[in-house]
Amino acid sequence: MTKGDLVHIPQGALLLGSKDKSIKQEPSYLKIEKPSRAIFWCLDVRNPSWASVYYKEKIWDVRLRDIHPITQELENVS
């Protein structure tokens, strides 16, 4: 995945407020109540099993196993 890719976040995934000091936001968490979409931001270079996503106007840390890339083929399936 590269920055800007659309990703799927399944119900029940836990998002943690970003620990990046350059991003000023309150530390918090969010449990996804229904399947959602977000924008892939970056991988955590210190811990490659975590990534960051842009969701609801904030950057969140999420386990890499909890996000799945959305490909063009899947978007067109109805």
Image (cartoon, grey):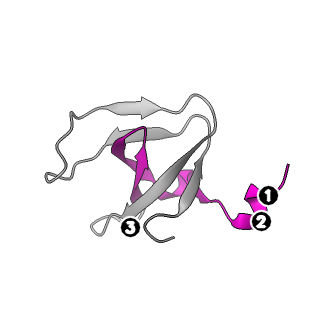
Q: Residue furthest top?
A: 33
**Residue picked out by circle 3:** 48
Judge the density around disc 3: few (<14), some (14-19), many (≥20) Cα neighbours within 10 Å.
few
Residue lying at 55% horizontally and 54% vertically, measured from the top left: 67
Q: Amino acid at mark 2?
A: Glu
SS of the residue at dot 1? loop
**Nearer to the camera, 48 or 25:** 25
Residue lying at 83% horizontally and 55% vertically, measured from the top left: 77
Sequence-wise, the earlier of marks 3 and 1 is 3
Q: Does residue 61 belong to the magenta stretch? A: yes
Residue lying at 20% horizontally and 53% vertically, measured from the top left: 20
SS of the residue at dot 3? loop
**Residue picked out by circle 1:** 76
Return the x and y of residue 75 as percentages of the image width and height: 73, 56
Cβ–Cβ under 8 Å for marks 1 and 2 = yes
Whole-number angstrom distance, CA of label 1 to CA of label 2: 5 Å
Judge the density around disc 1: few (<14), some (14-19), many (≥20) Cα neighbours within 10 Å.
few
Q: Amino acid at mark 1?
A: Asn
- Left or right of 4? Residue 71 is right
Return the x and y of residue 73 as percentages of the image width and height: 77, 65
Sequence-wise, the earlier of marks 2 and 3 is 3
**Residue picked out by circle 2:** 73
Q: Provide the residue span drawn in magenta.
A: 50-78
